[in-house]
Image (tube, grey):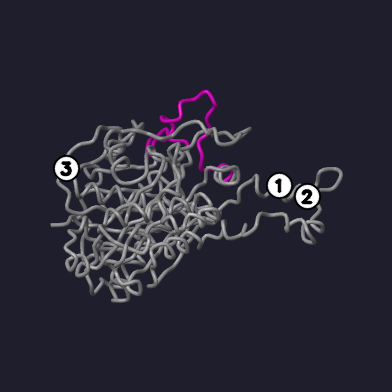
Amino acid sequence: MGRSATPVVITGLGPVCGLGVGLEPFWQALTAGTSAIRRIDRFETGSFGCPFASVLPEGFDVRTLVPKSYRKGTKVMARDIEIAVAGAHMAVQSAGLVTRGTEGATTVTIPPERFGAHIGAGLIAADIDELTAALVTSTNTDGTVDLGAWGSGGMNNLTPLWLLKYLPNMLACHVTIIHDCQGPSNTITCGESSALLSLGESMRVIGRGDADACLSGGAESRVNQMGLMRYWYSGRLRAMPAAGQGPELVRPFDDQASGSVLGEGGGILVVESADSAARRGKAPLAHLVGFGASQSVCTDTLGMDLSQNGEDIAAAIESALDDAGMKAGDIDAIVPTGCAVPDVDAGERAALERIFGSRLSTLPIATVVPNAGFCGAGTGALAACAGVQMLATQTIPARLNATATPGLDAAASPSRPAALRTVLVLTASLGGQNAAIIMRRAS
């Protein structure tokens, strides 16, 4: 699909992760080179090889971020939903919007029928305590689960409205109810690329005139036993003894990288037509000018066996460049997945080399995963928030840990000023879906 007929801008940012809730703590941590990766103390990690993760700050309470009239609704919010709701709250504030979710509001900024939402989600893992409390009522004398007993009555011991906490579309559901988004709405579940695919869909919806603004992004928490198990057995986590130092684990594009560390987080951005932002006197933070997507052929079904020449991931970048009417030489910085999983890093590196050639060694690369952890469907949203801030502040944030990144400007370094006009944000996902967006500095 070609360029949008209606120019699209980003007017609000709502990152939420272990670095903090909202833009200020997030960006301050990135520029200071702070990591939120710590030893997991929420549950017993047992024999898992990676007992580290990045979790939301202690004291996080989603009830303080919803209208008083909606606080009962927080009882059926899984952690993923809480992150999305918090991100939407912070994004709405950042954009200067008034919605039905604004306490004391009598009028709203965007007509509800012109306000959409597209939010990427993971396959939410049910709370182990809730699930096992019901399963234990259907066990045989030897401790095995009797599926017949479970089907005939055991499942009735799940907490009321249990399923409503764990459906992936509930992130968008709660956000749209709180903020009265009656325009086009969708949920995308394509692993780490979910957030950028959601931003691309919002861009298309606004570009064809079906909405004036959308809440868009993604969120996920994999810091639970089921999430940890899935990523461990998919070969994406770094093996590390409990005595190791968590913040130093993740080394994107480093020759010695051996895996990533999970996080919980994501973000919501306000994507808006340039005309809508102008009518309400809101200066854009950045222009969203290009979007592209592609699918890698993953014979292993895990998104690890990527093409050696990078053509699959490169196709998403090429599509985004074409959509923006730009060439590779117009890109000034890159925010890739940068997850430190060797096969994924190698696929991204090959794609970037294919697109940028010898110029790649001088293109600044920004990474977020060493700071906030590998946040699943929220990964791209955090990368997009970082990209917007890079343009707004003309700054490359600090990079952590990596030392040997030949051919890439990706080694550990402090934050530094840079002349940035355009930033490419890229994600490659578990399962092989790739997405890329291009943002241009607001004049």
Query: Magenta stretch: residue 250 in it?
Result: yes
- For label 2, the residue is 137
Q: Amino acid at mark 3?
A: Ala
- For label 3, the residue is 418
How far is disc 1 from disc 3 in space, using C-alphas? Answer: 54 Å
Seen at 23% across and 65% down, the residue is 324
Instruction: Kindly report the secondary structure that dominates the magenta region of the rendered protein.
Output: loop
Q: Is residue 343 left or right of residue 200?
A: right
Q: Nearer the viewer, mark 1 or mark 3?
A: 1
- Label 1 SS: helix
Query: Disc number at residue 103?
Result: none
Query: Magenta stretch: residue 275 in it?
Result: no
Q: Amino acid at mark 2?
A: Thr
How far is disc 3 from disc 2 in space, using C-alphas? Answer: 61 Å
Q: Nearer the viewer, residue 214 or 240?
A: 214
Q: Earlier in the sequence, mark 1 or mark 3?
A: 1
* Image quadrant in which the C terminus is located: bottom left
**Residue 380 seen in the figure:** no
Q: Residue furthest left?
A: 443
- Label 3 SS: loop
Q: Residue 349 at x, y = what percent?
A: 35, 47
Tell me the magenta residue range. 232-258
- Give yes or no for contact between labels 1 and 2 (Cβ–Cβ under 8 Å): yes
- For label 1, the residue is 133
- Label 2 SS: helix
Q: Amino acid at mark 1?
A: Ala
| Mark 2 closeness class: few <14, some 14–19, many ≥20 residues within 10 Å | some
How far is disc 1 from disc 2 in space, using C-alphas? Answer: 7 Å
Q: Nearer the viewer, residue 416 or 32?
A: 32
Seen at 61% across and 48% down, the residue is 127
